[in-house]
Amino acid sequence: MLSTLARAATRRPLTVILFWVLFLLLGFGLGTGVFGRLSDNVAEVPGTESEAAARYLDRVDPAGESITAVVEGVAVADPGLRAQVEWAVTQVRTIAGVAAVPDPYATPGLTAEDGRALIIPVTLDGGLDDEAEEKAVDAAAARIQRIDAPEVHVSGGPLLGTQIGERAQADVRNAELISLPVVLALLLVVFGGLRAAALPLVIAASGIAGAFLALFAFSEVTDISVYAIQVTTMLGLGLAVDYALLMLVRFREERRDTEDVALAVHRTVTAAGRTVLFSGLTVAVSLTGLLVFPSTFLRSMGLAVAAVVVVDMLAAVTLLPALLARFGGRIAPAKVRPEGEEGRVFARLARFSARNRVAVLAAVVPALLVLALPVAGMRINLGDAQQLPSNTEARRLYDTVGAHFPAGTGVSPVIVVLKPGTSASTVDRIHALSPRAVSRDLPDGTTVVELPPAGSVDGKAATDLVERVRNLRGDEPVQVTGTAARLVDFRAMLADRAPWAAVTVLAGIFALLFAFTGSVLLPLRTIATTLLSLGAALGAVVWVFQDGHLAGLLGAEGLGSLSLTAPPLIVAIAFGLAMDYELFILARMREARQLTDDDREAVVTGLRRSGRVVTCAALLLAVVFGAFMTGGFSPILQIGLGLTLAVLVDATVVRMLLVPATMAVLGRRAWWAPAALRRAHERFGLREEQPTAVPRATTSV
């Protein structure tokens, strides 16, 4: 297959390039329409009690979602301000789609005890379609914001999702403006020429276009999270640079041995292209674990990110070879270095680790385990507007309410749906759970009880309240929903499906690595060392963002928990990225072993030949992830830090020290497989073409 792609790239490069130009136009044209379709409902899990109850209320409850406004900065009793607020409330009530707007001066709890702020809640009609809801929200927000006061902030409900989506779009744009020039500068250092340095950015643009197009396509059939734009863009950009870097380094090496550009492209695709193919497949397989979860958010993220990985992979093995076939003659071959000079530092590291394998293992493994210790105390929550930067509208509203009103004000209540047939004693016991319980009757005879929790919307008090209702209801027709109930159900879903996701991913990775190496021990070693680096990175994220250590350096704060979006995405993506570097190294080790049949020297040669690529790729990927940490949105900061650390730890400590040490411990057994599996691999396995030794000059040019 790769030989066919190589021939297509060298014989019809302009056709291949034209196809990808059309793809780019489609991605940056149609694909960017996804920005208007983003959802912030990440905790919904189809089939759970909280989701079923929410859908039931959507059908029968005359009241719909709500938005919240807060006015601050002058005495709320000021006659001029009071007249403005009352007139604004009167006008908002007349807007189509608005169900109710209470008078903040006549409703207890809506004016602050210090007299410096007031809250205006706006409840929408139930059953509104998206267009009608958007018009009602925009009209209500615009009218309230015309109140002449020092601070007027409006957010919550559907407006919060819109604000986060706009923030996501701005963060992506800023991250690209920061990362692309830095990446280009580093590529110039690596390649020493603008032509070669620009090619990875062309592949990166293809990956980003693929990200937008994939997300837009998935938005036609499922909700797309507000996090999807940042995560898929950062990964699409990073992996594209990784794959292009590997291919370009190999192409320049092949050009050192032949002046025939077409032959160099063919050799590059059949050798490095095979590594890219397997690498893309392993990253995609790592993300299939997200498909095991019934969560719409996790499934959509898994599909979208996997699609981006596939686009990057295809661009690297089709578009890049076509560009090389057309313009590769202008790219300078790799310099011929004296024997032993190429990759000298990495060769020394490999020999050091191999000679001192026991000491390296005794030092590195415990250190990584210590870094991973905070994972044992990890907590996940939905989070609230506190996760946003302090200059955003939602965060300002959150901070203003927190500064002027009692704790728990504005927190989404635990919603209990009491269907006809519920006993009076059960109703009374549920009411007794909260002194601020409020109930209302629906047209079909159902009673809805709202139980305001103490503390935050996803704190222990709120989740305990959900469990208490579910424990006392017995067999009564009672359901619990609301934000806290969705969090309880999401956590239960994670605990139930996580083992199956792990088995799915590990089995898929094992199968691919076996197909790549023909060994059963190498996949096990790879999985073990990767889990160490992954645990260390996730432990650091917990230590910073949950416990609050050094969080201020990142413009964040300790929140007491991680966003429920961060851990599953960090684990899935980082595991796949670690396979990238493992395959880069194993491919070179395998080539050297086939040529020399010397297992120890194959390890040294593999690191000598791949160490520079792996290090450069990790540095470039860290730059990309680091740029996405400039936005200030805590969940993205968590994901960015986790992936940055996972990449750097894996590409340095694990691949440069643990890999040669463990390979030295295993020796020739590293490539072992049972006879039956060995025969199966020889017959069906996907292998590189047998490399041919090419004499190289030993003098510098």
Image (tube, rainbow, N blue to C red):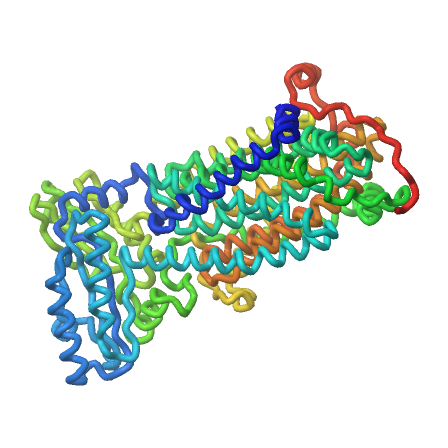
Vertical arrangement, residue 178 with respect to residue 271, above or below: below
x%, y% of residue 149?
A: 26, 79
Q: Residue at x 73, y 38 (%)?
A: 251
Q: Residue at x 82, y 41 (%)?
A: 354
Image quarter for residue 357?
Answer: top right
x%, y% of residue 15?
A: 56, 32
Residue in the foreground of this view, choosing between 440 and 26? 26
Residue 700 in view: yes
x%, y% of residue 145?
A: 25, 71
Residue 357 in view: no
Vertical arrangement, residue 490 with respect to residue 502, above or below: below
Residue in the foreground of this view, choosing between 602 and 271? 271
Q: Is residue 67 left or right of residue 672?
A: left
Screen quadrant of the N terminus: top right
Q: How many marks?
A: 0
Q: Is residue 577 left or right of residue 673?
A: left
Q: Residue at x 63, y 35 (%)?
A: 322
Q: Residue at x 67, y 31 (%)?
A: 269
x%, y% of residue 484?
A: 31, 52
Vertical arrangement, residue 68 with respect to residue 536, above or below: below
Vertical arrangement, residue 505 with respect to residue 465, above or below: above
Q: Is residue 517 left or right of residue 130?
A: right
